[in-house]
Image (cartoon, coloured by chain):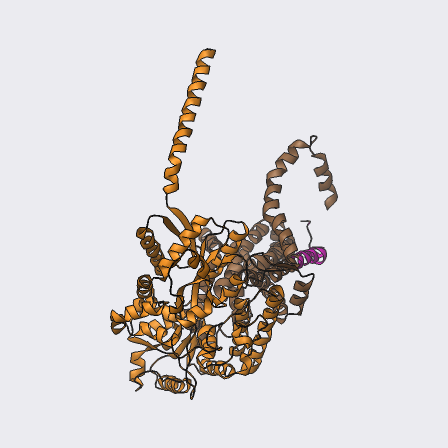
Amino acid sequence: MGRASDEGLKRAHFKEVRLPVLLLVPQLGILLLFFFIPSLRALTQAFLLSDPFGNTVQFAGLQNFTELLASESYRNSIQVTVVFTLAQNALTLASALVLAFASDRIIRGKGLYKAIILLPYAIAPVIAGILWAFLFNPAVGPLAQLLHRAGIAWDPNRSGTDAMVLVVLAASWKHICYNYIFLLAGLLAIPSSLLEAAAVDGAKPLRRFFTIGLPLLGPTLFFLAVMNFVYGFFEVFAIIDAVTKGGPAGATNVLVYKVFTDGFVNLDLGSSAAQSVILMAFALLMTLLQFRYVERNVNYDV
Amino acid sequence: MNQGDIVMKLARRTLALGAAALLALNALPAAAAEPVQVQWWHAMSGVLGERVDELTKKFNASQQKYVVVATYKGNYDELINGTIAAYRAKRAPQLVQIYERGFMTMLLSDATLPVQDLLTQRNYQVDWNDFVRPVAGFYSYKGKLMAMPFNSSSPILWYNKTHFEKAGFAKPGETWQELEKQLYTIKQKGISACGSVLAGDYHWSLIENYSAINDLPYATKANGYKGLDTEFVYNKTLVVQQVARVKKWIDDGVMEIAGQGLSPEQLFTSGKCSTYFASTAAHSGIERNARIDWSATYLPWEQGKTPKNSTIGGAALWVLKGGKPAEYDGAAAFLAYLAKPETQVWWHKVTGYVPLTDKAYQMAKIEGYYKDHPTREIAILQLGRGTPTDNSLGFHFGNFTQTMFAQREEFDAMVAGKKTPQAAMDAAVARGNDVLRQYEKLNKGKY
């Protein structure tokens, strides 16, 4: 797949060196300031034991890393992160898919339907988090009361599982619309001739979806899965902070939230830096694995 | 335009510039007479933030030489992070408000100037021995006050008078055993939905202050006062029984956890829960919001014990290195102003924090302030109860926040039923000791 586009790129190269460099400078400058320098500092900090004010610094070697790997709470955090991202990914993709498929079948009020689905994306994560926390608060939340009346002992303040369910719900709710837009576009791009032919052959909508729609959505689904992983790893800080603060007993303490609490609340900069290095490596690895193994099963040809 | 004109124009412009420069030079002495600005970063939001602004306004109006500029920098965590960043960038303010748990971090940071030295060098007459003992004790190192106590509080027991009266009790019992019976009675009679509500800072009121009041060792080396090689030992004291009791209350529906999205104080002020173990600083909020008949009393103690003093929470003002001498003169003037009994009484009345000196307390008492506001005196009397022991003077732990978080996590695990109270406290102590050892390693020989 790559060959033809590579040649295309080569053919379109600039004859002069100065202009492209000049055009690249602003972007590289931003990357340097906001990515490379901070990353480098995190990397060096990860090998130091230091007082937060920076007046006492000792070289710690790999101590920050070995301590992390030996710590039960860090291993718990890894486990929590994996469960959280997988659950969030599955729930988001499945709901977005259903919604996208359904919007194809809706005739009246299509605009309104889409608007309602897209709304959560416009809500600030903290607000969304507080909203969910309040709705499901065992003492005053209306939805929690419903659950209690149904005989479910719902209490995210004490039960780690309930807390996890709550943050997965909140995080997915916030991200469904992002998935929805891409899936809707993907569905619209499916040639209608294929679907019509199947319809003529007597395939029902569900059948058409599973045998034609879903396989053709492969590239979109793959892209979204990667994006959802990135979202689950890095962008759920505000929601976790507003809904559970990583509790109870670390049950929702995902890696990115732990980096924050250890670094900015506990002021343990060395450990926090080591964690962010590991997190970066972990995210890279996950993405690579996905490209290596999942992408094999994705068919880009329509 | 010919050349002559241009030359003329240039000459005129140069003259004008020169004149302006001369004027500016003349203006210099005037600029020097301008008041010196002292930057103060704080974490007081809402009503408390307004009080801080009033305070600086009062100080600025009281003299002409200095202007204290107070800036709100977010909550305590955000503030200490902002301070660290500013210090590293060499743009630190002269005064900064840091929570009590940050004492050791600030003390051994090499970034601060001891407050007592700063004021003594400038000949301010402050009666250092007049400071309330647990307050001065917390912020002192080798007998010297290192930071100026600013907003100090202590936890007390808030209660709903109507609930207690309905259950046939005049007031909450003095000991945990009596109080427990009362709360269970209130629950059984269906007077309230919950006997108590767990405060956000329960580790402070129900564990740390519990240890101090009952004179139990929290850690070796006089709770860290006598060395960095201190080790937590609260897993071997009545604390285990105390957290087991709290868990039992929660299990039996006698105590409620407010959780995220809801403030525990609301559950008390709305009349849903009958008691609330929280800071005396909650006065401003409770006085404003409570639609119930409330009162407050001392924190309970264990049956058969003679209760000791409680310890403080809140924050102190630290002086950071890196400023100009004139700025430190201003900072010292402001801190001396803060220490004045009149300022103390005013601050005490408008915020609910305790007065820091005995003189200030006596002044408020003579005024008859506590006749109208009896609950405002509880924290002061509780802080001044008996002579502080090694167990009740306060806590000097490096990375105290981090050890506290470990403790809270283990407490949560216990409440969730994942660990027994003993196992949870053992784990909290073990994790806390790891943190203390790391701090000791980094700061060896500095304390």
Measuring from the top left, give residue B202's x and y in whole percent.
45, 73
Q: Within the magenta stretch, is there residue A20?
A: no
Q: Is residue B13 above or below residue B171?
A: above
**Residue at screen point 63% across, 38% down:** A24
Drawn side of residue B176 relative to residue A269, left or right: left
- Residue placed furthest toward the right: A3
Residue B225 visible within the image: yes
Q: Main secondary structure of the magenta part?
A: helix
Q: Residue at x 34, y 60 (%)?
A: B47
Residue B71 appears in the rendering? no
Q: Looking at the picture, does residue B395 appear above or below residue B57?
A: below
Percent position of residue B93, x then y:
46, 52
Q: At x 37% / y 49%, what residue is drawn? A: B66
Q: What percent of the width, then of the height, locates residue B175? A: 40, 85
The spot of residue B87 in percent (x, y) is: 52, 53
- Chain A is which colour? brown
The chain letter of the orange chain reads B
Quarter of the image for the N terminus of chain B: give it. Answer: top left
**Compared with residue B383, is residue B439 higher up or lower down, i.e. above or below?**
above
Residue A295 is inside the magenta segment: yes
Quadrant for residue B166, please give it.
Answer: bottom left
Numbered-mark total:
0
In this picture, is B426 found above or below A80? below
* Res B264 → quadrant: bottom left
Magenta stretch: give its range. A281-300
Please identify the quadrant where the C terminus of chain B is shown: bottom right
Nearer to me, A102 or B267: B267
* Viewer-proximal residue among B157 and A33: B157
Q: Residue A199 falls in which quadrant of the image?
A: bottom right
